[in-house]
Image (cartoon, rainbow, N blue to C red):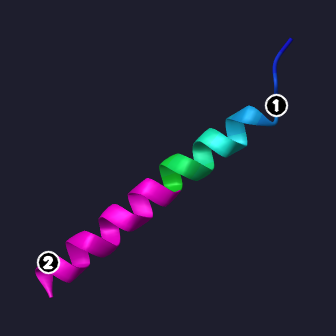
């Protein structure tokens, strides 16, 4: 049994972390 609802949540968290990291990097560069 695979919980298909959990995977998108994990992906969303990863994408959110990457997005925040990207914003921080852009802030640092600019």
Q: Residue at x 60, y 44 (%)?
A: 11
| Left or right: 25, with 9 as reference point | left
Instruction: Look at the image and tell me in which quarter the N terminus lies.
Output: top right
Most prominent secondary structure in the magenta stretch? helix
For the residues labelled 1 and 2, the Cα–Cα distance comes to: 37 Å
Specify whether residue 3 is painted magenta.
Answer: no
Instruction: Look at the image and tell me in which quarter the C terminus lies.
Output: bottom left
Residue topped by disc 1: 4
Q: Secondary structure at mark 2?
A: helix
Which residue lies most toward the left here?
A: 29
Q: Position of residue 14 (x, y in %)?
A: 49, 47
Which residue lies most toward the right here?
A: 1
Q: Position of residue 17 (x, y in %)?
A: 43, 55
Q: Residue at x 40, y 57 (%)?
A: 18
Sequence-wise, the earlier of marks 1 and 2 is 1
Residue topped by disc 2: 28
Magenta stretch bounds: 16-30
| Left or right: 8, with 18 as reference point | right
Does 14 sit above or below residue 25?
Answer: above
Q: Residue at x 26, y 72 (%)?
A: 24
Specify whether residue 19 is painted magenta.
Answer: yes
The part of the image, by quadrant, that contains residue 5 is: top right
Determine crowd level at label 2: few under 14, some 14-19, many 20+ residues with C-alpha closer than 10 A: few
């Amino acid at each position: 049994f695979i919980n298909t609802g959990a995977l998108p949540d994990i992906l969303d968290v990863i994408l959110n972390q990457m997005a925040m990291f990207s914003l921080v990097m852009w802030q640092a560069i600019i």
